[in-house]
Amino acid sequence: MNTAPRRALLLAALAAVRVKTQAPEFAILHAWLDSWSGLGLIVLGMHRHGYDLSLTHDRNGWRATFLHRSHVLYPWVGQVLCWWPTPWRAIQQAAWRALSTPFARDYSVIDDSLQ
């Protein structure tokens, strides 16, 4: 199954919630994604692309981290190092960062041919 169209739609939705405007179209999108059901849709979309979610809460607010299953050695992929007042904002920011950041090169395997 080609996941590129779904990834593009997820990125477009995440980009739209980052736009600061009073346009009614964006208000509708915010009302949808700034809710528990919108949060679930983002988490489901990220899961389909191979990401697992860690969501934490304390007196500082909410923090989310998306970790790609094929890069368990890179837990910082998609991690937002600041706290947000709402869980949906934390998840939106972490998902945006995870999808926008290329994977780091894996240096754990040493190629002897380079020496």
Image (tube, helix red, strand yellow):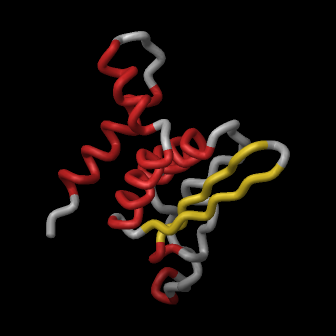
Number of numbered tags placed on the structure image? 0
Q: What residue is shown at x 60% (from left), y 75% (from top)?
A: 73
Q: Residue furthest bottom?
A: 112
Q: Residue drawn at (70%, 47%), measured in percent from left and top?
A: 62
The quadrant of the rendering that contains the C terminus is bottom right
Against 75, is 80 above or below?
Answer: above
Check the picture and name the quadrant holding the N terminus: bottom left
Residue sitting nearer the eye, 79 or 103: 79
Q: Nearer the viewer, residue 22 or 71?
A: 22
Q: Residue furthest right?
A: 59
**Residue 27, relative to residue 107: is it above or below?**
above
Nearer to the camera, 46 or 39: 39
- Left or right: 10, with 96 as reference point: left
Q: Is residue 100 visible?
A: no
Residue 48, percent across and down? 33, 66
Position of residue 95 relative to residue 14, above or below, is below
**Residue 83: percent from the left, percent from the top?**
73, 42
Pinpoint residue 18: horizontal percent, then vertical percent. 47, 28
For the point 62% across and 54% down, the residue is 64
Q: Quadrant of residue 79?
A: bottom right
Q: Is residue 3 left or right of residue 45?
A: left
Identify the residue at horizontal 69%, vertical 36% (top origin): 85
Question: Can residue 85 be seen from the camera position used here?
Answer: yes
Q: Is residue 112 left or right of residue 27?
A: right
